[in-house]
Amino acid sequence: MKGILAAVAIALGAVGSAQADEGAIQRVIGAQIEAFKADDFTTAFTYAAPNIKGMFGTADNFGLMVRRGYPMVWQPGSIEYLGTDSDGAIWMQDVLITDGFGRLHQLKYTMIETPDGWKIAGVQLLEAPEVGA
């Protein structure tokens, strides 16, 4: 009986930490999007993982890429956080964004935990979800 209670306690603890990670991840994504909306690419760049920082080098280069390649993230209409998956070290957060024209975009954020907290290691634009009547 003690073994079963210990297993349940461990499982509940794991669920609690997974939920805490999901919340932390969503806060990082949300904070970066808020920085984009304010055209504060310097702050937005602080949420990027080292691989992204190395790829773009400067906040200005990063901002240019976002404005050109991800306008729905730069100036979104609305944001909805969907499912989160993890393999342990890397988390994936699906996000549904409605752009300023009312079009839906589904993105998959790749997240890694660093000594400085959660960072965005990549964003993949997925096929837009079907909308029907």
Image (tube, helix red, strand yellow):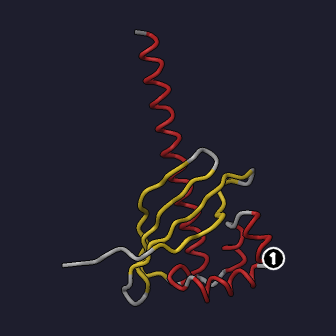
Answer with left or right where residue 62 lies relative to residue 90: right
**Disc 1 target residue:** 57
Q: Which quadrant of the structure image shows residue 12? A: top left
Residue 10 to residue 71: above or below: above
Across and down, in percent, residue 121 comes to: 66, 63
Residue 103 to residue 87: above or below: below
**Residue reaching furthest top?**
1
Asked whether 28 or 109 is in front, the reply is 109
Answer with left or right where residue 31 lies relative to residue 6: right
Across and down, in percent, residue 86 comes to: 54, 49
Q: Which quadrant of the structure image shows residue 64? A: bottom right
Mark 1 residue element? loop
Q: Residue at x 53, y 67 (%)?
A: 30
Across and down, in percent, residue 13 comes to: 50, 32
Mark 1, other Cα within 10 Å: few <14 / some 14–19 / many ≥20: few
Asked whether 80 or 91 is in front, the reply is 91
Amino acid carrying mark 1 in the image:
Gly
**Residue reaching furthest left?**
133
Q: Residue at x 18, y 79 (%)?
A: 133
Locate the N terminus and report the quarter of the image it occupies.
top left
Residue 106 to residue 19: above or below: below
Q: Residue at x 76, y 70 (%)?
A: 53
Q: Residue at x 59, y 82 (%)?
A: 38
The mark tally for this picture is 1
Across and down, in percent, residue 61 comes to: 75, 84
